[in-house]
Amino acid sequence: MGNEGSALPGLELDSSALENTDEWTLHSATSSSNASPNLSVFCGRQAHDHLNNNSLEHAVKNLRVYRHPNILKYISSWTHQGQLCMATESVSPLTRVLGNQTVLEICLGLHDILKALIFLHEKAQCSHNNICCAAIYVTNDGSWKLGGLEFLSRFSDVTLSFLQKARARRYEKGVPPEEDSSKTVDPKAIDAFAFGVLVEEVFHKIPDDVQIPGFKEFREISKKHLQNSEPSLRPKLSQLLDQPIFNHRFVIIHDFLSELPLKSDEEKTSFFRGLVDQLREFPQILLASQLSVLLLSRLVLLDKTAQEHVLPVVLQPHNECRPLSNPPLFCMDTFKQYIVPRLMHMFSVRDAQIRLLLLDHFEQYCIAFSKEQLRTKILPELLVGIKDTNDTVVASTLRALAFLVPILGAATVIGGKRARLFTDGRPKQDGTQVCANCLIGTQMA
């Protein structure tokens, strides 16, 4: 679709839409100017009554103002051929991926949305007014993000008149009964009702006997209490955080990693020392899809305890031919799918401490990259490292380059013309000159 009129130079949109609504289409996109090259772009539809662009305008306005880790991240907006466009972090609609998510991933996602709503209610003094599957998006690392902020409003502005004007474009099943019978409404109760409907819908194919603590009870709370016809009897959303379903060990681990900047040094030391044993209790695909980005975040990478206890089993694929007392968390296929893309991004970060840590473990994980990835992505970054003024970076980079020689060949790694400058001066055995290459290969084996 090109980049005419774009506020982001180098923007390229995928012509096929991930989502089609009455208000907009959602496209995957890339940008050469953004720190994160993968984006999502919402493109407003043509409309005679201007309601469509107004909806996106309201979403843009609110996403710019209300920032939270669990709210869809706004990046930029512009007008293209008379239509409003908005770029956000790269996401997919929940409706497209929900069927492939495990019950634990859904619980994590609901926890994400719950925290976003609590922020809106208790910090921003706003209500969302249209909580539903269509208002939720999922990032590449599996996090759920609250979107659909086109109907968000401050508590003081939420009236029956406001709600009725937007009624036709809101999710009808999430509209509470008091909107049809009351003269006044409680904005928090409106969101509580809709959240109860959301829980019921995302759990509708999951049996009650699933092995998640408090699952059945939470489902009943969502049906009987959150969707209570009497608004005053609906619990506050913040009260739901105490439910066992949101205190599952995996949820606690995810939360701790997400909130690492708020933790004390003592808390982090205790957490990282016991983390690996806890992680081994869960399927590696779940760990990789939900925690890999968090485990390779800057704060984890630079933590001394994490460097000692966690990173050695994260920055190395499992090799059955080389059994270890503390085996890696991920098999080769999982490592290639989830960890390698993250490592390639990390090599583009010009931070000496991050680069040194990557180089320290390079021998363990370089075999997980394809030759093409090593040649086109990793090698150019390593060649930058040998030109740095930091002697430690240069020395570590040279050691890493040595590991690439058997994989890519010396000509690729060091370039230039080469000639045989050394001879094999060993005496012949049984009348035959010893093959230097064979001997070297035997020693390496």
Image (cartoon, helix red, strand yellow):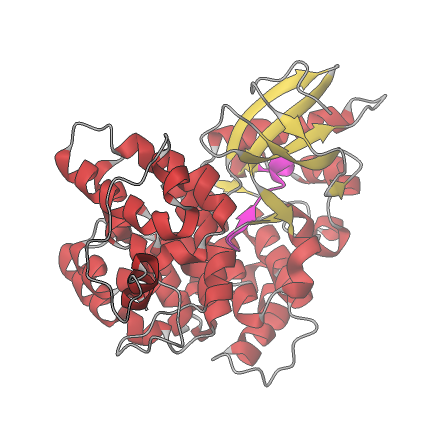
Based on the displayed image, in which of its 4 quarters is residue 85 positioned? top right
Between 58 and 176, the residue placed more toward the observer is 58
Q: Position of residue 61 (x, y in %)?
A: 56, 26
Q: Residue furthest right?
A: 48
Q: Quadrant of the C terminus?
A: bottom left
Asked whether residue 102 is drawn in magenta, I would say no
Between 149 and 380, the residue placed more toward the observer is 380
Instruction: Judge whether 215 appears above or below 10 on screen.
Output: below
Based on the displayed image, in which of its 4 quarters is residue 14 positioned? top right
* Residue 200 in view: yes
Asked whether residue 145 is drawn in magenta, I would say yes
Q: Position of residue 271 (x, y in %)?
A: 23, 66
The stretch in magenta equals 141-152
| 284 on left or right of 189 | left
Q: Residue at x 25, y 69 (%)?
A: 429
Q: Residue at x 17, y 62 (%)?
A: 269
Instruction: Judge whether 387 appears above or below 297 on screen.
Output: above
Instruction: Judge whether 49 appears above or below 62 on screen.
Output: above
